[in-house]
Amino acid sequence: MPIDDTAPIRITAFDWVPDFAKGQVRDLRVRWALEEVGQPYAVRYLPQGSQKAPPHRALQPFGQVPTYEEGDLTLFESGAIVLHIAETHGKLLPTDRAGKSRAIEWAFAALNTVEPPIMDHAIATLFEADKPWSKPRLPAVEKRIDERFGELSSRLGESDWLDGDFSAGDLLMIAVLRIVKDTGLLDAFPNLKTYVERGEARPAFRQALADQMAGFTGATPPQFIEWEKAMKEKQGELQ
Ligand SMILES: N[C@@H](CCC(=O)N[C@@H](CS)C(=O)NCC(=O)O)C(=O)O
């Protein structure tokens, strides 16, 4: 689905992020959902820092991306946006009441149960890799992730998707799991690795990822040059 500057839907994304975040910024989840339902969209790119300025905070109170604008409606929170897209297009959610509720349950499980320990890991190994507390914290963080992955792996079993057809719940769960896909944390759970690969093989995901990557046209902002150097040095020690 081409990005279309005249489309009635507009999202926000960054024009620069550190290398480790490329392909992971949360506008990817929204792009992926839009691709799945076949909805063209426009992108407004933000230079790093401007997300904290009042005009963007009026759209996103926490000064983050993504946002989603459609006529009078402005939304933030990637999960809420993905569910809105699914509801609007009558796709990515089963039509029966119980099945729909279960898909939404998996969306919450992804964002509220599986993502928090994964983000603790990203904070320790990436965002705060240069801090003295990160290394001692890692074993406990990894243990918690291992427990969660074991539980998710047992439930998924040999199924392709979490509950019937591919849903918004799978989209969000796969987006969350892929945050650690290069860390080895998924290695003990072959069915979760295959699950992530199955999601990433979807044409909608591939297009969304390619479009996010193509949007990183900004130069490293001066305030990030030293930070990025220090972080890269420490990162090697932690991974
Ligand atoms: N829960 C929010 C999290 C959004 C979020 O963490 N956005 C990050 C990019 S992935 C961001 O904008 N970070 C920049 C900042 O916080 O200044 C969502 O899912 O939309």
Image (cartoon, grey):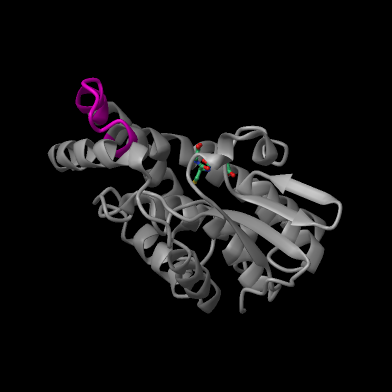
| Residue positioned 33% across, 55% down in the render | 181
Residue interval drawn in magenta? 125-138
Q: Which of 115 and 15 is in front in this view?
A: 15
Quadrant of the drawing holding the C terminus: top left
Percent position of residue 90, x then y? 79, 67
Q: Nearer the viewer, residue 76 or 205?
A: 76
Quadrant of the drawing holding the N terminus: bottom right
Percent position of residue 179, x then y? 39, 50
Q: Is 98 displayed left or right of 35 in the figure?
A: right
- Verify whether residue 234 appears in magenta: no
Furthest residue in direction right, as rendered: 72
Q: Is 41 displayed left or right of 110 in the figure?
A: right
Q: Nearer the viewer, residue 190 or 124?
A: 124
| Residue positioned 17% across, 36% down in the render | 234
Percent position of residue 225, x then y? 28, 42
Percent position of residue 96, x then y? 80, 62
- Verify whether residue 130 appears in magenta: yes
Question: For residue 221, what is the image quadrant?
Answer: top left
Q: Which of 9 and 111 is in front in this view?
A: 9
| Residue positioned 65% across, 57% down in the render | 11
| Observer able to see residue 146 | no
Above-or-below relation of 101 to 127: below
Q: Is 160 displayed left or right of 17 in the figure?
A: right
Total marks placed: 0
| Observer able to see residue 68 | yes
Question: For residue 231, what is the image quadrant?
Answer: top left
Q: Is 57 displayed left or right of 29 in the figure?
A: right
Above-or-below relation of 165 to 74: below
